[in-house]
Amino acid sequence: MNKPRNNTPVQPSAHRDNAREDAMDAAQGTAKKDVTVPTLGARGMLRWGWTQLTSMRTALMLLLLLAVAAVPGSIFPQRVQDAFAVATYIEDNPQLGPILDFFQFFDVYSSVWFSAIYLLLFISLIGCIIPRARKHYHQIVSPPPRTPRRLQRLPEYGAMEMAAGGPTPEQALADAEKVLKRRRYRVEVRRNDDGTGSVGAEKGYLREVGNIIFHVSLVGVLVFVALDAMFSYRGQKVLIEDEGFVNALVAYDNFYPGSWFDEEDLEPFSIRLDSFERTFDRQLFGGEPNPNYGQALDFVASLTVQDSPEDEPRQAELRVNEPLNLGGANVYLPGNGYAPVVTVRDGEGEVAFSGPVITRPDDGVYTSMMVIKAPDASPEQLGFVGLFLPTAHDTGEGLAVSIDPELGNPELHLNSYYGDLGLDDGIPQNVYVLDTEDLTELNSRESEAGGIVLAEGETQELPDGMGSIEFEGVQDYIALDIAYNPGTTWILVFSLTATAGLITSLFLRRRRAWVTVETIPGVAGTGSEEPAPGPDAKGSEHGRTLVRYGLLARGEDFRLRDENIALRTQFEKIWPVRPPEENNES
C-alpha cells in the first residue's frame, strides 16, 4: 500500500529558525565586509556642531547655564562694584581668595567663561530663529494643505444634507468660503468641473509668529543688557545743603563704570542743593500721638539744576521714587540725614578740621553715627566717634537718646582719641569707621575726663592740652544715586514684546478646516422620492447637495469641539439643512 504524500517527514520549526538565522548572519557578515562607513570630515563636523548649537534644546541649556553662572556674582564681592571689599576678602582668605581671583569669580560678568556662555546663547538663539522664521514664511505664503479624501477620520467631523430647494454646489462652496473667512481662516476654494469641490482653510499662524517674536525679543533683551553693562555707569554723591555737584568723574564719592565706559561720555550737568524738607506724621487722636507718630511721610529736595553749561539754571524738586533725568541719567534720592558743623583745633590752637560731618542714621528718630578724623592736628592726629541726637533726652541713667527725628535739642555725644589714624599709609579707609585699636583714648564715659557732650554752640577742651572741639550748627544732606543705563528703555520694550509673544503662542491654536461639497445621485424607481437614509448614504433625489466638513488641530486643542459647533451653527443659519427626523422617517 502506498504511503500518503502528506506523511512525508517535515523539518522541525526550531531547525528551520536556526537555519534562517544562520543564513541571515552569513548575509549580514558579507554585507558588513562589503560596506565602508564614510568619514564625517571637517566640513561635516562643522555642520553637525552648528546643528547641535542652534537647536532649541541647546538654547534652553545655555539659558539655564547662564543663570547658574550668574550666581557667584551675588555670592562674592565684585571688583567693579567694590574693589576694597575684594581686596579685603582676598586678604582674609589667603588660600581660597587667589584661586577665586584666578578663575575671575570677582569679575563674574566680564569673565571669559561668562562671556562665552552669553555669546553662545546669543548665537544659538539666532540660529534657531532664522530657519524657523524662513519656514514659517513659506507656510504663510503657501496655500492651505490639500483636502483629505476621508474627512470622517478627522478628530471633528460633520455632514449636512441640504433640503429640497437648497443651494447649488457652487453656491454652497461660496457660502462655506464666506463663513470660514468670518471665522478668520485663510481660505482656498478648489472647484471641480461639475461644480462640486472643496474648501481648504487654516488659521492660527499668529501662534508661530508669537513664538518667533518671543525669541527675537529674548535676543533683543540679551543685546541691550550687554550694551547696558558695557556703556552704563552708576555713582553716588552726598550733597550737603548749599553745596554743588558737577557730573565729573572726580566729583563722585563712589563710581562704578561699565566695561566700555569713557569719561568723555559724561554729560556736564550740575546740581545744587538749596534746601531739604522732611515731613513727619504729627497727627494726634484725643490729644495722644497715634501709633505712627513721628514716621516720615515725605522728603523733598529743592535743587538748582543746569542741564549743560550753555543752558540756564532752573529750579527742580527731587522726591523719593520720582527721579530727575539729567543728561540721559536718572538722579534718585535714596537717603538723607543731618550734617553737624564741627570745628576741631589741635594742641597748638590751629584749626585741624572744620566743616559739616556726614552722619549715618540708624533708626527712625535719626540717631546717627558720626566719625571725625583730623589727620592734620599737631602734635598728634585726632579722631572722634560717637552719636548725633536730633532731639536729645536724658534718661536719668547717664544716657541720652533721641526721641524725635526733627531738630528739637541737637547734641553730640563723642569719644575722642589721638595717635596715628593710618591715613598716611595710602590704604583706603571707610570714612564712617574709626579704627581705635592703635589709638590712645582721651574722652569716654569710662575715662576720668568723661565723654564729650556738646549742645549747639558749645565748645569743649580736650584733655592733656590736645585741643578742643566746637559744635557750631546743623545742616541737611541728601544722598544721590546717579545711574546712566542707555539700554533700559529697549530692555523694557523687548520684555513687553516677549511677554506678548509668549501669551500669543500659549493661547492661540493652529487649526485646519476642510469643507467638501458633492451632489448625491437619485435612485431610479416608480417616481416617488426616496431620501437617503443618512448623510453618508446614496439614495436621495437627483441634485441633492451634501456638505461634509472636518477639523484638525496642530497639537492639543481642547476647544476644537467648540469650533465644530460654531461652524455648524453658522452653516445652519444660511442653509436649509434636512433635519435628521426626515431621514429617519424615510
Image (cartoon, rainbow, N blue to C red):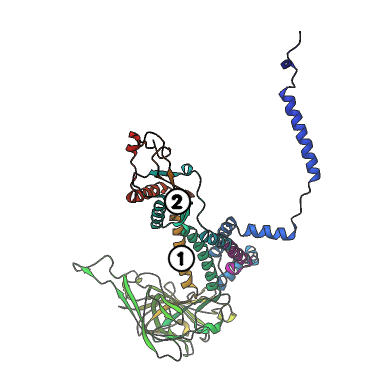
Tag 2 secondary structure: loop
Q: Is residue 223 magenta?
A: no
Q: Which of marks 2 and 1 precedes in the sequence? A: 2
Q: Quadrant of residue 282?
A: bottom left
Q: Which residues lie in the magenta part?
A: 103-127
Residue 520 seen in render: yes
Q: Is residue 118 magenta?
A: yes
Tag 1 secondary structure: helix
Which mark is nearer the camera, 1 or 2? 2
Mark 1, residue position: 497
Q: Residue furthest front?
A: 526
Q: Marks 1 and 2, how far apart in space?
A: 47 Å
Q: For the point 55% across and 67% down, which residue is it?
A: 77
Left or right: residue 251 versus residue 115 is: left
Q: Is residue 133 above or below residue 260?
A: above
Residue 450 seen in render: no
> What amino acid does circle 2 point to?
Gly
Foreground residue among 53 and 67? 53
Foreground residue among 23 and 322? 23
